[in-house]
Amino acid sequence: MKRNKIIFGLILSLISTLYSCKSSVEKDAQKIAELKCESKELLKKISTGDMSVIEDSKNLGEKITQLSEEMDKKYTSDEDQKAFLEALKSASAECD
């Protein structure tokens, strides 16, 4: 009986670990997707001749660069990158 409790505990720990990793990937992908949406909105404004968003565009570019560098360091394996790109595709669909 004690052995079953230990095995059950280990399984629960593994499941919670895997779930939290997935959540992290989805959260990171959501951050990038939000910046992507922001970028599209700024491009729409610029295309209409609204040049007041130039400073916003520069700030957004800096945020995107910084976050991209963080993601490159965080997701180094092929498997991690694939999971991130899938999550990003899903999160970006809301913007399109």
Image (cartoon, grey):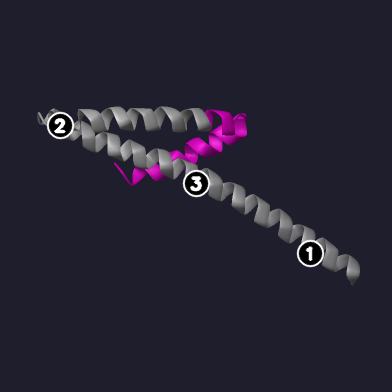
Label 3 or label 2, whichever lies nearer to me, is 2
Task: Residue 26: give its label.
Answer: 3
- Say which quadrant the C terminus sits in: top left
Q: Position of residue 91 (x, y in %)?
A: 40, 45
Q: Is residue 61 left or right of residue 78?
A: left
Name the dominant secondary structure of the magenta segment.
helix
Can residue 89 be spotted in the picture? no
Residue corresponding to mark 2: 52
Q: Amino acid at mark 1?
A: Phe
Residue corresponding to mark 1: 8
Q: Is residue 79 above or below residue 25?
A: above
Q: Residue at x 72, y 61 (%)?
A: 12
- Which of pointers 3 and 1 lies earlier in the amino acid sequence? 1
- Which of pointers 1 and 2 lies earlier in the amino acid sequence? 1
Q: Residue 92: which quarter of the image?
A: top left
Q: Is residue 64 above or below residue 9?
A: above
Instruction: Classify mark 1: helix, strand or loop.
Output: helix
Range of magenta residues: 71-96
Do the numbered discs 3 and 1 sit on residues whose CB atoms are within 8 Å?
A: no
Q: Amino acid at mark 3?
A: Glu
Instruction: Classify mark 2: helix, strand or loop.
Output: helix
